[in-house]
Image: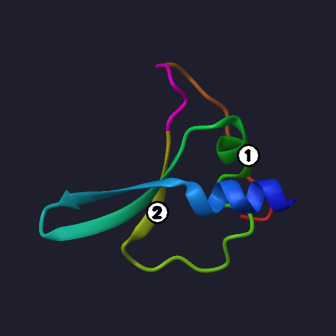
Amino acid sequence: MLQVLLEKMKMEKTKVKLGNKEYTLDIASTQNELRKGLMGVTNLAENEGMLFDFGEEGNHEMWMYNT
């Protein structure tokens, strides 16, 4: 569990501007980051979110328990 928490702290972030609003997004790209997703996140600000980078185009299934 500590390893997943450490990876979460190192997760790459990006800022995206859509219209007049700016968003801060975590980028999930490693297997652990993709697996964990937003599980355990109890609060997101209105301008926060997550992008999932699977490394290739295609249909990808997602399931995040307790999200």
1 vs 36, left or right, is right
Q: CA distance from mark 2 to mark 1?
A: 16 Å
Numbered disc 1: secondary structure: loop
Tell me the amino acid under the disc marked 2. Gly
Quarter of the image where the N terminus is located = bottom right
Q: At 65% from the left edge and 42% from the top edge, which residue is drawn?
A: 34
Residue identified by numbered label 2: 49
Numbered disc 2: secondary structure: strand
Comparing 23 with 30, the one in front is 30
- Quadrant assignment, res 8: bottom right
- In this picture, is 22 found above or below 18? below
- In this picture, is 36 found above or below 54? below
Residue 20: x percent and y percent? 12, 69
Comparing 33 with 45, the one in front is 33
Q: At 83% from the left edge and 61% from the top edge, which residue is drawn?
A: 2
Q: Is residue 63 magenta?
A: no
Q: At 52% from the left edge and 19% from the top edge, which residue is drawn?
A: 58
Tell me the amino acid under the disc marked 1. Trp
Q: At 73% from the left edge and 46% from the top edge, which residue is drawn?
A: 63
Q: Residue furthest right?
A: 1
Residue 48: x percent and y percent? 43, 69
Q: Return the mark for residue 12.
A: none
- Quadrant assignment, res 19: bottom left
Residue 9: x percent and y percent? 61, 63
Count residues near mark 1 (Cα–Cα under 10 Å), then give few for <14, some for 14-19, many for 20+. Answer: few
Q: Are circles 2 and 1 on residues that touch, CB within 8 Å?
A: no
- Secondary structure that dominates the magenta span: loop
Specify the segment rendered in magenta: 53-57
Q: Is residue 54 magenta?
A: yes
39 vs 14, left or right, is right
Residue identified by numbered label 1: 63
**Among numbered discs 2 and 1, the one appearing first in the sequence:** 2
